[in-house]
Amino acid sequence: MTEFTDMGVAAIRDGVRDGDFKAVEVAEAFNARVEKAGALNAFLVTTPERAINAAETVDKARADGGQLGSMAGVPIGMKDLFCTDGVETTAASDILKGFHPPYESTVSGKLWEAGAGMLGKLNLDQFAMGSSNETSAFGNVVSPWRRNDGGDAKLSPGGSSGGSSAAVAARLCPAATGTDTGGSIRQPAAFTGITGVKPTYGRCSRYGVVAFASSLDQAGPMARDVRDCAIMLGAMAGFDPRDSTSLNAPVPDWDAALSGDLKGLRVGIPREYRVDGMDGEIDGLWQEGAQRLKDAGATIVDVSLPHTKYALPAYYIVAPAEASSNLARYDGVRYGLRDLPEGADLQEMYAATRAAGFGAEVKRRIMIGTYVLSAGFYDAYYTQASKVRTLISRDFQTAWADCDVILAPTAPSAAFGLGEMVGDPLTMYLNDVFSVPASLAGLPASSVPAGLNKQGLPLGLQLIGKPLDEQTVLNASLALEQRSAFDAKPQEWWT
C-alpha cells in the first residue's frame, strides 16, 4: 500500500470513507514525519494531539454510520496567521509571542467541521510581509528543494506562505492553508512544486485572520494537485456575517465539476507580462503551457492589460498604507508583547513595544504606509494608487470580452537562495510582478507546477479568472496539470 504521507487530500478522505484504513493511522504517520523535519523550520507549533483527536472523531463517526465531511480524516497544516482557539498564534512576530486566541478563525473552524485535523501552526513571513520567508521572528523556513549542482545551498520556499509550501512539498502534510495579499499563495507554490489557489476576494472569510492589508488579504488552499485544492477550497469558502467583505454567494461543488476538457475556452496571453530581462526558461515554459492548453481544446488569444506596469508600485502604496492602519492595534496594552522601560510614559511604552516586537520589514512597510497616508502626501500617493487600482480592474474587465481565463508565469524566477536578496528590498518586491495585478483586481488565480529549470527546481504557471469563476480557473489548471505531468518531488535530506 502507498505510504500515508505520499497521499493527498482526496486519497486520504476516500480511503477513510471506504474503510481502507483509519484516520488515526494517517494522523500518526504525519505526526511522526513532522517530528523528524525540524531542519525545515516549517512548523512554529506542533499539535499532534489535535490531529489524533480529530481523527478519532472521524473514525467513530464512520463506525457509527454517521456523515463524513469533505475533509474527513485529512490532517493539515495551518498557517500561523489564522487564529486557533487555545493554540498560540503569532503571525511569526515577537509582538504576538505567547498570544493564545480565545476564539477560532472562520476558515479554520470550517475545516475542522469538515473533518480535518491540525498538525500544527506553520511558519511565515512576519505578518505575511515578505516573498522569501526570511522575515519571520522565529527563523527562516528552508525549502525542501535543492539545486542539482551538488551543492547544499539553502533555498527560499517563497513567501509569505513559505511554511505552508515547504510542508506540503516535503510531505509533512497533504495540504495547508495559505493567505494571498499580493501573491503569497501562488509564488511559494511555484517555488516548491505544489498547487495553490487564491479565490475571488471575499470567497473565504477574513474573520480571525491576522490582518495585513484588508482590501487584499484572501485565504486559500495549498496542496499537491488541483483536485485537492478544489476539495479544500470548498470546505474553506462561504459567507460569514462577521466579515463585512465576505461575499454572500453560493459555494459551488468545484470538485464535482472539475474537467480538463477546455473545448470552447479562450485563454488570453497578456502581452504586457513579457517584461524586459525575463528568464528564458520561464518564457519558454509559458509558451509550452499555452500549447498544452491548446491541446486540451482551448483557443489561445492575445490580450492587453495596459496598466500592468503600474500594478507593483500601486500595490506597494496600497498594501503598506493598510498595514500601517491595521498594525496600529499592537500597542502593548491589551495583548501580546509589552516593553515598559522604567519611568516610561504611555507614548514611550508604545514606541518601545513596537521597536522590540516588529521586525525590520514590518517597520519598513509601516513607515512607507504612514508616509503615503500623511497630510500633504495622501493625494499624491494613496489617492493616485487607488485610481491606478481601478484602471487595472478595468483592464481585466475589458480583457474578459476576448478571453475566459488568462495564462501567465507565476514568478519571474525559480527559488533563490536564502540570503541572496535580503539586502535588496526592491529586487525582492519584484518577485510579485506577475501575481500582484490579480490581487489588486480581487480575481481568482492559481499556480500550477509545470516543469523544472536546468537546476532541477520547480517552475509554476499562473491562471487568472473572472470574479467568482473559480471553476474555470480550476478546470484550466487541471488541464495544465494533466499535460505537464509534473511528478517531481524533493530528495529527502532533512531527516
Image: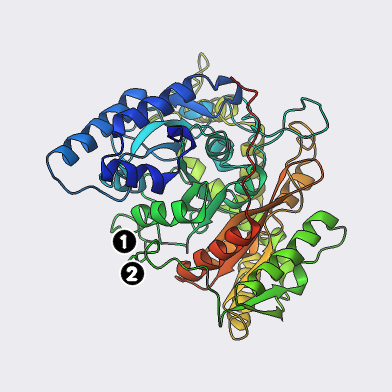
Task: Give the secondary structure at mark 1.
Answer: loop
Point out residue 66 in the picture as x, y percentages from the top left corner: 14, 46
Q: CA distance from mark 2 to mark 1?
A: 7 Å
Q: Residue furthest bottom?
A: 401
Q: Residue furthest top?
A: 342
Query: Amino acid type of disc 1?
Result: Phe
Point out residue 277 in the picture as x, y percentages from the top left corner: 87, 58
Task: Give the secondary structure at mark 2.
Answer: loop
Quadrant of the rendered image containing residue 388: bottom right
| Residue at image location 34% in from the left, 53% down from the top | 235
Q: Residues within 10 Å of mark 2 (few under 14, many from 20)?
A: few
| Residue at image location 46% in from the left, 29% down from the top | 96
Please state if 281 lies on the left or on the right of 248 as rendered: right
Q: How is the image coloured?
A: rainbow
Q: Earlier in the sequence, mark 2 or mark 1?
A: 1
Q: Residues within 10 Å of mark 1 (few under 14, many from 20)?
A: some
Q: Residue furthest left?
A: 64
Circle number at residue 249:
2
The residue lying toward the viewer, choosing from 269 and 55, is 55
Point out residue 118 in the picture as x, y percentages from the top left corner: 36, 34
Q: Disc 2 vs disc 1: Cβ atoms closer than 8 Å?
A: yes
Which quadrant is the C terminus positioned in? top right
Query: Amino acid type of disc 2?
Result: Ala
Q: Is residue 375 visible?
A: no
Quadrant of the rendered image containing residue 262: bottom right
> Please, is residue 30 above or below residue 328 in the view?
above
Pointer 1 residue: 239
Q: Is residue 297 visible?
A: yes
